[in-house]
Amino acid sequence: MDSHKKIKFVLVGGFLGAGKTTLIGALAKLYAARGKRVGIITNDQADGLVDTQNLRSQGFDVGEVAGACFCCSFNDLVSTAEGIIEREIPDVLLAEPVGSCTDLVATVIMPLQERLGDRFDLAPFGVLLKPSHALRLLAEDADAKRGGFSPQAEYIFHKQLEEADYLLITRSDQLSEQQIDSLKHLLAKAAPGVPVFAVSAPSRDGLDNVIDCIEDESIAGRRLLEIDYDIYAEGEAELGWVNLSARLLEVSSAIDLDHLASGLVSKIASKVTDAGGEIAHVKVSVLGGDCQAVANVVSNDLQVDVGLAAKRSVIGDLQIVINSRVAIDPKKLEEICHDAVVEVTSSYDATLELGLSHALRPGRPVPTFRVTV
């Protein structure tokens, strides 16, 4: 590839649990099938991200920016992108920001355009939303408008919609036509003039529309927000974040990876609900040899989904990684995750070794750069 050719830089935003990683994986496969080289950058407030492990297991070159959001670690984002470029210059670079972030046009897209516009071709900014959140938070009926999150956290959700160049309703294969039409009606009021598409990464429905948006020559990031950083900070601080790792050693009989991953998510979700927490996203990865299972749940009232099925049972050491994002005290969430691992794995003939655990509330966002009108 010509080293002077611009790399298409694609930022895909959306609230926690919207399905960004699944969509990015599907887009990466589509681009690869078209003969394009693809790099991916993931982002989290702490180390130990299931998404990074998941995408790497699919064979993609993945860099991770951990410890802060893209906007607050802009230089790390650039250096991570440069690391991927040094290994093999990609045609497309897909980047997934932290799900509780907004104001990304002013703090990521436009600073990239100003400083590295000669290297990157910035794609229009797409924002995903999960139907369960949108139907509740945008409902016109006051009785149906129940969020579970505080007004400050809901503020982040609304701001994410406001700055999008296009919006994606995910999990369309699980929705009726009536539900999709209802969501499009609500979004037309919440984000007037913004194109809306229904997509399903597993079935690939609507992905051609996403590619068309990415390849559109329109200027990326046309909607600068007016945003109250005090409210934004309060909304992020409502969420408890826990990344926890563990290993199962001396496994003497075969363990079904999908069953273990879904069992852990189910146990955590049950304990969170009993404790009065509101789930934004709980995700568990179980890795054994060259096989991986990933299960998740994105709401208190939704079933566990095995997004990446191993469809295998394994004898041997297993690695477990848990990422939980819940409106609850992070220390309580850490206790819940710890207890769930102990309880679920106690039924196996194996030795549990608990690894690192990181519990936090996101701090106030302090962008490295912020472009204003």
Image: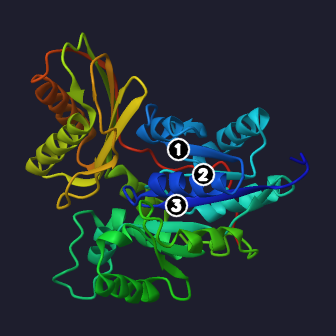
Q: Give the CA separation, mark 1 to mark 2.
A: 8 Å
Residue under the image location 26 percent in, 39 percent down: 258
Q: Is residue 337 visible?
A: yes
Return the residue nearer the eye: 235 or 255.
255
Residue under the image location 61 percent in, 67 percent down: 125
* Residue 66 left/right relative to 349: right
Q: Quadrant of the C terminus?
A: bottom right
Vertical arrangement, residue 110 with respect to residue 69, above or below: below
- Image quadrant where residue 187 sits: bottom left
**Residue 296 x/y as whole percent:** 29, 48
Classify mark 1: helix, strand or loop: strand
Which residue type carries mark 2? Ala
Which residue type carries mark 3? Gly
Q: Give the CA separation, mark 2 to mark 3.
A: 9 Å
Q: Would you name the residue on which mark 3 appears?
A: 13
Q: Is residue 324 visible?
A: no
Residue under the image location 80 percent in, 59 percent down: 114
Classify mark 3: helix, strand or loop: strand
**Residue 346 x/y as whole percent:** 11, 22
Q: Would you name the residue on which mark 2 appears?
A: 95
